[in-house]
Structure formats: structure tokens, C-alpha cells
Amino acid sequence: MAEMLRRAPLSRDRILRAAVALADEAGIESLSMRNLAQDLDVVPMAIYKHVANKDELLDGMIDVVVSEIDPLVPDADWKHTVRRRILSARQVLLRHPWAPLAIESRNMATPAILAYLDSMVGAFRAGGFSADLAHHVMHAMGSRILGFSQELFDASRRAGRSGTTNPEPPAALPPEVAARFPHLAEIAMAASHDNESVVGQGCDDQFEFEFALNLLLDGIERLHQQGWTSSRRPR
Amino acid sequence: MAEMLRRAPLSRDRILRAAVALADEAGIESLSMRNLAQDLDVVPMAIYKHVANKDELLDGMIDVVVSEIDPLVPDADWKHTVRRRILSARQVLLRHPWAPLAIESRNMATPAILAYLDSMVGAFRAGGFSADLAHHVMHAMGSRILGFSQELFDASRRAGRSGTTNPEPPAALPPEVAARFPHLAEIAMAASHDNESVVGQGCDDQFEFEFALNLLLDGIERLHQQGWTSSRRPR
DNA sequence: ACCTGAACACCGTTCAAGT
DNA sequence: ACCTGAACACCGTTCAAGT
């Protein structure tokens, strides 16, 4: 009768989904082959039947995350198309805070990421961009094209934070650092003063992300309209 | 007589410099407390007299790297000041390819980084930026303000690569991926066609970095000139 | 042929025994 | 009081012994 309690048979897909869930809930530092096996009610070595090693497991997890990004919906306006996709990617990353670091540390072009990038280049080309400009624009967007926030100190990268705003009330700047770094203290104040009631509630991450994204896309649009070309490069 | 061969006494500074050298030469994945101790001709536990644990060691290494960035030289032109400093930071990171990932994974504001950021905010303020605009501009620059390249797949992040251009001749895109991702293949071509002689030599990383940096700084200058303010934020 | 437990070669860090 | 070897609690992965 013990057989009746047996779990679904192990598969690469079931392993990847369990690994993503484990990283989401407990943090990427808790993702070990042994912990994952325990979550799957399986002996550690059983996992190696389906993934060659931990690096391949991470690549698979990255592909799972990328596959959650909304497909690109073609539109007459390239800016709208690109913007919408990137905001969707950002929403996915908020659900998987470990993903940016995992992607950067793996430093490998998985098929899913290549397909994502390819479709983004396609959106620029469909918008009338030259291959030359599209090339440099893709470099300039960098990891932001996958929805990365690129903040130096990202509270949401720590243990699974879900909201889009930082809830800690005073934590923005401890008084002793505010004294040593007056410019930082000043702009920290500037962040909170226009929000009525709550003081020092921190930044609206969504606003900062869209501010940066608009800055980039507006600049890109200007280059496109000016017919920018890379010929006659410096050096 | 064996005493005559004794190394200089251990100190936090000597440990940090040895750790940076080890990470530079062998990669961050080779930096273990045990390997580091061996490089220092010391028993592993001796290190713990000077740093509390490995995380504190990493923080110290990050501060060493940040301290190598040229000091900010004030100038009438904020754009020139900021641009020059960031290009200097990038040169430092080229010498320490492990640093960006280490900084992102630590996710901690060390005093050296705070001082760096504070001085950058100061440059914007001296250029006439409001605290409000300076705040959002710092967020928009993100890790780029420390010279991060933010490339999704950065060859220089792998084992200590020193040059500023990728030397591998054909490696840009293997033919089987070029077939599946035509847009990527196209822009890869666009990168190499205007360089005479060598085909598919890859991108000029310095050019791509400056292209992105100019895009950002030009956009920021435009907002500044227009007297941008965050009042009446969306939502 | 397949599965799996033990074992190997590492980690970071604690701790107690030695001086 | 200080130093340090052994030990502990982990890793990812190999491998041989079991079925």
C-alpha cells in the first residue's frame, strides 16, 4: 500500500519547478541539490538522471523564469511594444528575486534568453531601426532589457519581498551615515518629502524603474529620429 | 634560522590585498578561506583574527577596489566630471572582473561605496541639479555609476581577461544559433562589417560602454535643462 | 541496466585542547 | 591569553556495490 503514496514520477520539468519554488521561498542560498531532493521526496542522486549538474539546473530555472514573460505583442509603435515587454519582465523578476543574480552569475546564453533577445531586436527592426543602431541600442539597454532594476542596493533581492514599495518606515538612512554623507541624506529626503503623511518611506521602485526606462527609450527614439549611425567611430 | 624566512606579520590590509590578487588571478570561485590562507603561508584560522567571516572579507575587498577609482575632480561641467569618474571606475573594474558580481551579491552599502555615491550626488548638485532630480538620476544610473557594464553576457567577467575588445575571431555567433535567431545574427554582423579586415571580431566594449553612458548623460542633461520635477507623479 | 548509499574532495566556521 | 589542529555541518559529485 505504500506504493499508493508514491509521488509523481520525477521529470526534468518537475525538478525545475520545485527548484524555482525553493529559490522563491527560501532564497537561492538555500537551493542545494540535497535540499531540492528532500523537497521532491527523492534521494539526491536521482536528480542527476535529469540534469547533468547544478549549473544545468540553474540554466533550466532561468529558462522557466524567462518563459513567464509575456510574449511580445507587435504594435505599430516600437516604443510601446518594447516598453510593455520590459515592464512585464520586471513583474516576473519581482516574483523571482534570485533570478537577476543567477542570470548574471551563470553568464550563459540559454535558448530562452536568446529567443527573448532576438524578438526584442525584431521589435526595433520592425520600428525602422537600422541593424547598426539596433545593435548598439541592445548593448545600451543591457540587462535592463530583461527587466533588471540595476539598483546597487536592492532590498527586493533579499528574502522574498513582494510589494513594489519599501515598507520600512525610517530605515532609509541611519542618522550616523546621514551625518557622514550629507548629499545622500539630502536626496533621501527628496524622495519622501512629496509623499504626504509618511516620512522617509523610501522610494517607489516602480516609479524609479519607469523613470530610468523612459530616459533610455526617449534617448533611443531621438537617435533613431536623427538617423544615427556608427560610421566614423572614435579611435 | 627558520625564523629569518618568516613572512611579514598578518594584517587586515595584507589579507585584503592577497584576497583581491587571488580573485584577480584565479577567479572569485577560487577564493576560499583555505586557499587564501595558503597564499598567505598561514593556517586558515589565522585569518579570522582580522576579519569576522568571509562576508566581511568580501566587503573589505570591495572597498579595496572602490578605493582604486580616481578621486572626483570638480569641474564647471558636471557632465564632464561625472563622465570622467565613471570611465575611471570602469577601468578599475576591468582589472577586477569579479567585483561587479561580488558587489551585487553582497548587496551591502560599504562606507567606501557610500562615499563614492555621495561624491557623485555632490557633482550633480554642484551642476545645479535639484535634490529631487539628483535622486531619480542616481537611481536611473544604477550600477552603471560604478562603471558596471551591465552586459547580459560579459566575456570579461569570466577568467581574467585583460583587453578591452573580444579577441576570439569567429565566436560571435555559432552558425546553428544564427539560423534560429536571425535578428541576433543580423546585428552581430552589423557590429563587425564596418571594421575593415577582420570579420566577426566582436564588439568594441569601450565603444558600447561610452555609447550607453552618453545616452544616459544626454538624457539627464535634457531633463535638467527642462527643469524636470517629480511633482504630480503618476498613480 | 538501473538505482542508491557511501565516499571523496571540498567548503565556512566552531571549539576545545595545546602552548 | 593566544594560537591552532581537529571537528562539525554542510556542499557538489563520483563511484562502486547492490538490486
Image (cartoon, coloured by chain):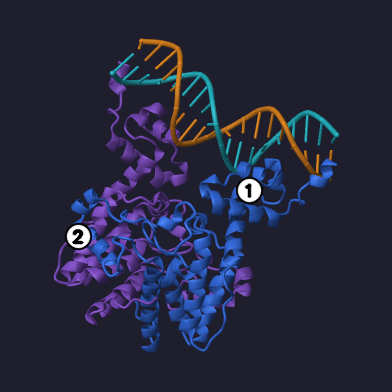
Chain colours: A blue, B purple, C orange, D cyan
Which label belongs to residue A14?
none
Q: Chain of mark 2?
A: B
Q: How many marks?
A: 2
Which quarter of the image is occupied by the C terminus of chain A? bottom left
Q: Which residue is mark 2?
A: B72
Q: Is residue A125 above or below residue A143?
A: below
Task: Tell me residue D16's x, y (percent).
Answer: 75, 30
- Mark 2 is on which residue type? Leu
The residue that appears at 44% across and 46% down in the rendered structure is B28
Q: Which residue is mark 1?
A: A53
Task: Report the front residue among B173 and B37.
Answer: B37
Report whether mark 2 lies on the same chain as mark 1. Answer: no
Task: Report the front residue among B58 and B173.
Answer: B58
Q: Quadrant of residue A61?
A: bottom right
Q: Residues within 10 Å of mark 2 (few under 14, many from 20)?
A: some
The residue that appears at 43% across and 41% down in the rendered structure is B31
Q: Quadrant of residue B134?
A: bottom left
Q: Chain of mark 1?
A: A
Task: Kindly state the secondary structure of the residue where label 1 is placed.
Answer: loop
The residue that appears at 34% across and 45% down in the rendered structure is B59
- Mark 1 is on which residue type? Asn
Task: Tell me residue B102's x, y (percent).
Answer: 40, 50
